[in-house]
Image: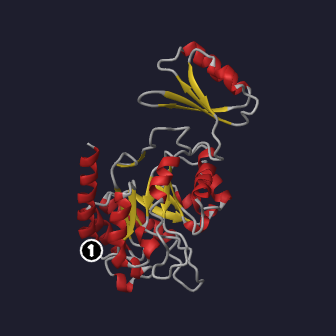
Amino acid sequence: MVIILKNNPDKAQLSNLMGWLEQKGIRIQETTGVSRSILGLVGDTASIDIDALRALEIVEDVKRIQEPYRLANRKMHPENTVIRVRDTVIGDGGLTIIAGPCSVESEEQICKIALSVKASGATILRGGAFKPRSSPYSFQGLEADGIKLLKKAREVSGLPIVSEITDTEQLPLFEDVDIIQVGARNMQNFELLKRLGKIDKPILLKRGLSATYEELLMSAEYIMSGGNKQVILCERGIRTFETQTRNTLDITAIPILKSLSHLPVVADPSHSTGKAELVPAVSLAAAAAGADGLIIEVHNDPEHALSDGPQSLKCEDFRLLAEKLGTVVGAMRQNKA
């Protein structure tokens, strides 16, 4: 349920209303926007009389939310959520570029790539330390050593870092990681999501291979219901009948998720295509569709990468793509103006 308040509501009346709701076991999420304020009610609101609420002097309107996700719902939070990571923001209307290798392989490799992508315009460094792979014989990542090398690359480049967690036992290793990524395979690992809801750190939540929009938002709800509202949604491609690409980027997910939720939405053109030559076109399409960011795999030597080399851009190709993205974003901003 959502209570839309009139402008400048009487503070005493508002306090009485909130106290009455809390006595009924209702949790209240207060959102103050540019033009109005909203009280989002979380809990069993079946016994609350909507007409009685509407009759209050400070209330403009009351609406019931039909969707099962409450905290992630744009009806509860009309203004876009903006997430700040050190000196970088995600969701402020710009395009945040997250770039780096699929896997951290060595100090020289990750530091070299970090400096290169930063020079090209990336503002966040990605790198896998724990790698859940389809085959048990594939490279599984450097694990704890990979996290240490990512931190070293952050010192060298100044870029905040994002890396994927695969198990709750790894949480102590991620205390100094700026953004924790939940991969597609763990989107419905609810015990992991619950634990991530208890920490004060942005979570990059990737859509599962066959997950619906609602299922993705319900996974975000698990994190948010624990108290952590810093969730970034990621469309990373879904499994379809098509075999020409690794997955299929659902471009419609970007505008639809942004209409359903206030959370930032980023796209992953690397995992969705699986082919480096397709990444630039899909990146541009995602930017034009309104994505808040892109997460792109970049490697200084893709032919010898320990994982996902075929979908990784060379550093020079990433620089050229970043220039094109700047043109697209600039044109979009000009049209909005």
Residue topped by disc 1: 317
Residue 168: x and y, percent?
63, 61
* Residue that lies at the very extreme toward the right in this rendered image: 47
**Quadrant in the picture for the C terminus:** top left
The answer to whether residue 20 is visible is yes
Compared to residue 272, the image places residue 91 above or below, namely above
Q: Nearer the viewer, residue 51 or 200?
A: 51
Compared to residue 34, the image places residue 114 above or below, namely below
Q: Residue at x 42, y 44 (%)?
A: 82
Dot 1 alpha-carbon crowd within 10 angstroms: few under 14, some 14 to 19, many 20 or more = some
Q: Nearer the viewer, residue 214 or 157?
A: 214
Q: Amino acid at mark 1?
A: Asp
Q: Residue at x 60, y 83 (%)?
A: 136
Left or right, 19 with respect to 37, comes to right
Left or right, 206 with respect to 114, comes to right
Residue 159: x and y, percent?
34, 58
- Color style of the picture: secondary structure
**Quadrant in the picture for the N terminus:** top right
The answer to whether residue 153 is visible is no
Q: How many marks do you count on the picture?
A: 1
Residue 79: x and y, percent?
45, 38
Disc 1 secondary structure class: helix
Q: Residue at x 50, y 76 (%)?
A: 141
Compared to residue 253, the image places residue 91 above or below, namely above
Residue 314: x and y, percent?
30, 77
Q: Nearer the viewer, residue 64 or 222?
A: 64
Q: Nearer the viewer, residue 40 or 60?
A: 60
